[in-house]
Image (tube, rainbow, N blue to C red):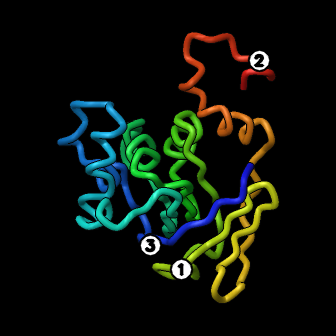
Amino acid sequence: MEILQGRVHRFGDDIDTDLIIAARYLNTSEPAELAKHCMEDADPDFVKRVKPGDFIVAGKNFGCGSSREHAPIAIKAAGVSCVIAKSFARIFYRNAFNMGLLILECPDADQIEEGANLMVDADMGVITDKASRKTYRVTAIPPFMQELLKSGGLMAHIGKKITHDNC
């Protein structure tokens, strides 16, 4: 995977899928429309501040709540390149990979500050704060899951036979 660089947008523990994309917007699955409302109930100004390549950094249990696939779609469509959290709700974890959204578990995510400029090397499992040069280790992503992300996620393959060559 390529090395990612962007700015941090911090959130706390137990950010549920309704905070990521509220139920009132679930009448569409159009990524661009969902992106307009990403994180709206947690931070009304998030979509005004987020830039392509930025990161969401959160505490434990990110993505808890319902199993809606709209949540990782909204995050990805808003331009977020990666979500870094202490832990993820298991259904969100799987949905993120299905939708092609990179997520990384980092035990020290709570030490990463709002607005920090990060460099993320998912292959090496290292996050670096560019200003302080502090590094954080992340849980490695298995190679087959990395391939899945590179190809746009499992949902990008619906209707196609999945092989190692096209995954």
Q: Earlier in the sequence, mark 1 or mark 2?
A: 1
- Badge 3 marks a residue whose secondary structure is strand
Q: Pointer 1 and pointer 3: residues touching (CB < 8 Å)?
A: no
Quadrant hosting residue 112: bottom right
- Disc 3 packing (10 Å; few <14; some 14–19; many ≥20): many
In this rendering, the label closer to the viewer, 1 or 3? 1
Q: Earlier in the sequence, mark 3 or mark 2?
A: 3
Q: Earlier in the sequence, mark 1 or mark 3?
A: 3
| Kind of residue at badge 2 | Thr
Q: Is residue 29 above or below residue 61?
A: above
| Kind of residue at badge 1 | Ala
| Nearer to the camera, 123 or 137 | 123
In this rendering, the label closer to the viewer, 1 or 2? 1
At 29% from the left edge and 64% from the top edge, which residue is drawn?
Answer: 48
- Badge 1 marks a residue whose secondary structure is loop
- Disc 1 packing (10 Å; few <14; some 14–19; many ≥20): some
- Residue identified by numbered label 3: 10
Q: Is residue 17 above or below residue 42?
A: above
- Residue identified by numbered label 1: 116
- Badge 2 marks a residue whose secondary structure is loop
- Residue identified by numbered label 2: 163
Q: Position of residue 16 (x, y in %)?
A: 37, 55
Q: Residue furthest left?
A: 24
Q: Is residue 133 above or below residue 34?
A: below
Q: Position of residue 145 (x, y in %)?
A: 72, 39
Q: Is residue 101 above or below residue 6?
A: above
At 32% from the left edge and 31% from the top edge, which residue is drawn?
Answer: 29
At 44% from the left edge and 68% from the top edge, which residue is drawn?
Answer: 13
At 27% from the left edge and 40% from the top edge, which residue is drawn?
Answer: 33
